[in-house]
Amino acid sequence: MIKITDLEKIYRTEEVETVALNKLSLEVKEGEFVAIMGPSGCGKSTLLNIVGLLDDPDTGSFKFNGIEVAKFNERKRADLRKHNIGFVFQSFNLIDELTVFENVELPLIYTGVKSSERKKRVEDVLDKMQIMHRRNHYPQQLSGGQQQRVAVARAVVNKPKLILADEPTGNLDSHNGNEVMQLLTDLNEQGTTIVMVTHSEHDARYSHRIVRMLDGQTVLENIMV
Amino acid sequence: MIKNYLKIAFRNLGRHKVFSFINIMGLAVGMTACFLIFLYVRFELSYDSFHSKADRTYRVVADIKTPTEVINADRPAWAVPPNVKDEFPEVESFVRIMNNEVLVRKGDIKFQEENAAWADSSIFHVFDFKLLIGNPQTALKEQFSIVFSETTAKKYFGKENPIGQTLLITGDAFPAKVTGVMKDIPENSQIKADMLLSMTTITQKFNQGLDSQWGSYGARAYLLLKNGTNAKALEKKFPAFLEKRNGTNMKQSQMYPTLFLEPLKDVYLRSTRDGHKSGNINNVYIFSIVAIFILLIACINFINLTTARSAERAKEVGIRKVVGAARVQLTRQFIGESIIICLIAFSLTVFFSWLLLPLFNQLAGKTISHSIFENISYLIILLFAAVGIGFLAGVYPALVLSSFRPVIVLKGKFATGSRGILLRKALVVSQFTISIGLIIATIIVYNQMSYMRNQELGFSKDQVIVMNTYGDSGKDAFKQALTTIPTVKSVATSSSVPGGGNPGAYSEIENIKGDLQVANLDLYFVDFDYINQFKIKMIAGRSFSREFATDTTQAMVLNEAAVKMFGYSSPQQAIGKRFKQWGREGKIIGVMRDFHFRSLQQPIKPLSMRIEPGGCDLVSANVAAANLPATLRAIESKWKTLIPNRPFSYDFLDEFFDKQYRSEERFGKLFLNFAILAIFISCLGLLGLASYSTIQRTKEIGIRKVLGASTSNIVNLLSKDFLKLVAISAVIAFPVAWFAMNKWLQDFAYRIGVSWWVFLMAGILATLIALLTISFQAMKAAIANPVKSLRTE
């Protein structure tokens, strides 16, 4: 599903040049659950952003489902993204002014799903995440665990092929964290590909494969058994 | 999708109450000011345009050249209109209108109709004054015909049918017949009358031969030209026409008129011949500019606050982009939000305008509009304007917001609010430039007003009551009777008092070369007590005196300006020189010091005074300040016995004189109000920005406090930036305001200088207001516990 070859990304400010990704190559197959680990500043998030089509690489090749997307412009990336990729963030990133239901509904609005269909699909997914009873609440009225479940619901409501999770348990206690990891595992078992950046060895153990990064390169891969 | 946008928009408004309030309030107040000014400007521009033939109707005016001066008259000689009609086939019709006060009696009811006019019967053909009852062709044909306005007709006849009824007019009690009732003349007409009387009454009865009078200027005149006539071309034919019909007369009198045609629609705003009674195109421009400024300030607030707050919306933008929003969709969302805010402001504007219209009418001194719903199309224009403003003010913030990159904003690495700081500063500077400019203008307008009111006028105007007897036969007895009232210190009669009108007389005065020089001299008929009572100072010769029998017919007093005009270098030289004026001949016996007999907008003109008891209709009484009501009662009872046919009314001379400044006063008041509004909206914006930048710097303030900064250090820190902007604004505003106000002052012959302290004061005022606005926020931030602010990160 994802095939990255010799990817480079360099951040420049006036005085400093930071190499975020240095000739990195990585492949993720459909249905995989991959965890990416490494110290702060090793380029994990940059990688995730590029994989998520939020950012573009300087050089190298990135094939998504066999299509070369490294040189896509923002519009094309956005189009591809909204149909194929769901995101889960460490800080949940829900819109404060929208209710649980409306937050989850948002991706469907942007992909042009009809209102009646939207309602059904949002309710389905809220049901699955067991937060149906909170549908009319605002994010601030929920606990962290509930908020992250809403975020996961939002990520999957469009039935994306790929879910990218950026330290999804970073802001959660261990109990809520485990619940979210279980959710991701379940999704993976139903066929969704998952790429997760994490600092937690515990969380990483949920994955099939751990990719370890250092200074913008992959240094080691552990296959979990 | 739209539902989603609306939801977000309204929830955002609800959540950020302060910002929403500032945005909506600022816009609503700005739009209200703008809308009211719009109504005012529309009204001023609408004068006389309701006449269906307005485009081919012209007012005839004349510049009259004498050997001494050029008189800019707002009317031609009596003979001009009928002769023009006779000479030029392209003239379809003419109408002469002479405004005059007329005493009207019906049994016990008596009114001094101040707003009466004598008019040729063609008035209903030339102008669209609609007759409700009566025949427009014939209503004013016969002598002693009256057409009342609807309101005036009700005053006399209530529900009775007025047609055919007889009333008594003038002091001589001529019977006159009501031949018509017209709709009240609208406010936006420069021709005003509550009752019209047939001109034939004057030209055929009171003063026969007026129609062939080439040297007497009494009535304003209007020409209706036939379709397709070129007015300029017609104007060019007038000199030859005058030469042909009036050549000998012109040479004899040495008065050479030139006739001009003023388009009817331009008379009110653009003609300079009507003095303070007319409108002024410059005021229309000034208020239009003020309106645009106020709106600009409100829009700037909106743009500033929205971009400043962009950091708060950044996360939302990021999320929306991550879940699939395209930039266009976001741009549309934010512009939509801005339009929604403007639509809310629009509804508030409608409410405010409805609330304020009566007050505004009062301030403007006339009914600009009876109701804002009177003309729905104006509200529709306002609605479109609101949407337009929403769009324009929303575009920039929308482009800024929608350009955020989710990778950056969602990671919290976003340099909050730093975007567009320069633009924001520039906008604040322009707001304060406008505000400071308006403060300066207001101070100068008020200074000029108070200067005019307090200037030494050269005569005594305090505690003087003026009554008009309109030449009633009882006037001399009345004057005599007043002297018997103990609290009346002195009484004088005259044809004119300062601040009112006076005749201009065809005069011949012996000049320095010994020749009789023709001039149009302003003339006051007075009695022996007048100069004394008004404390007018004599600087050469003597005042009128009962001891000289010849003074009643052969003596004239001139003012300094007149003496100078005839070439004398000292007043003394003029004493004993000859004069001829309106059938009288004699010697100049004295020269008085110049006094302001007109408003201070005009330079003091040459003036002559003569004794002429028959021309002295005005009775002026100098009364004691104590127990004024009793004095007035005593005067009124004398009036009632001696002048029973006329209603009693009086003016205090000081108030009467100040009436000349009424339009300036209105201008000043309107200006003050709008200046306050502009400053208020600017401050709203400043308050918003200050509170925002304080929030932005919460962490910085926390760190500074931990490191030992005092509260005053922090307040200083936060205020400094804004005060710098105010200082820059002042530097820009000063020269512009100086230039503009100097220009404005040029309209006044007697005016204040623009002094430096005005600028200093405006600068200090603006600084204080800004400081007050900012420091409230700054104090709050400075007092806050740093532990809290640091933990938020």
Image: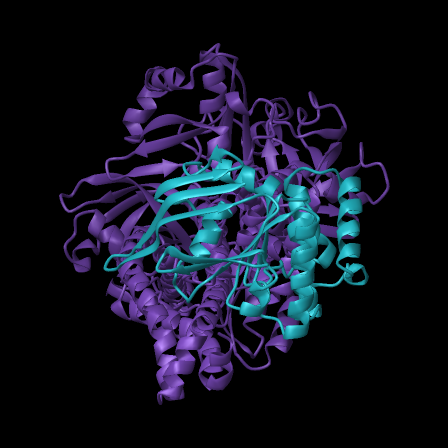
Q: Which residue reaches farthest front?
A: A225
Judged left or right of residue B44, residue B709 is: left
* In this rendering, position of residue B374 left or right of residue B670: right
Seen in the picture, residue B791 relative to A116 is either above or below; the reply is: below
The reply to whether residue B383 is in sight is yes
What colour has chain B?
purple
Q: How many marks?
A: 0
The picture's colour for chain A is cyan
**Picture quarter containing residue B433?**
bottom left
Between B391 and B565, which is closer to the camera in this rendering? B391
Q: Is residue B643 visible?
A: no
Most foreground residue, B431 or B48: B431
Query: Closest to the observer: A98 or B527?
Result: A98
Furthest toward the top, the residue is B89
Return the x and y of residue B457 as percentages of the image width and height.
Answer: 36, 65
The residue at 69%/59% (across/down) is A183
Residue B374's x, y, as percent?
70, 41
| Vertical order, A72 against B512 (above or below) | above
Residue A208 rendering spot, x and y as whole percentages: 58, 56
Residue at 29%, 48% (x, y): give it: B586
Q: Quadrant of the N terminus of chain B?
A: top right
The residue positioned 28% from the left and 35% from the top of the image is: B66
Residue B444: x and y, percent? 36, 62
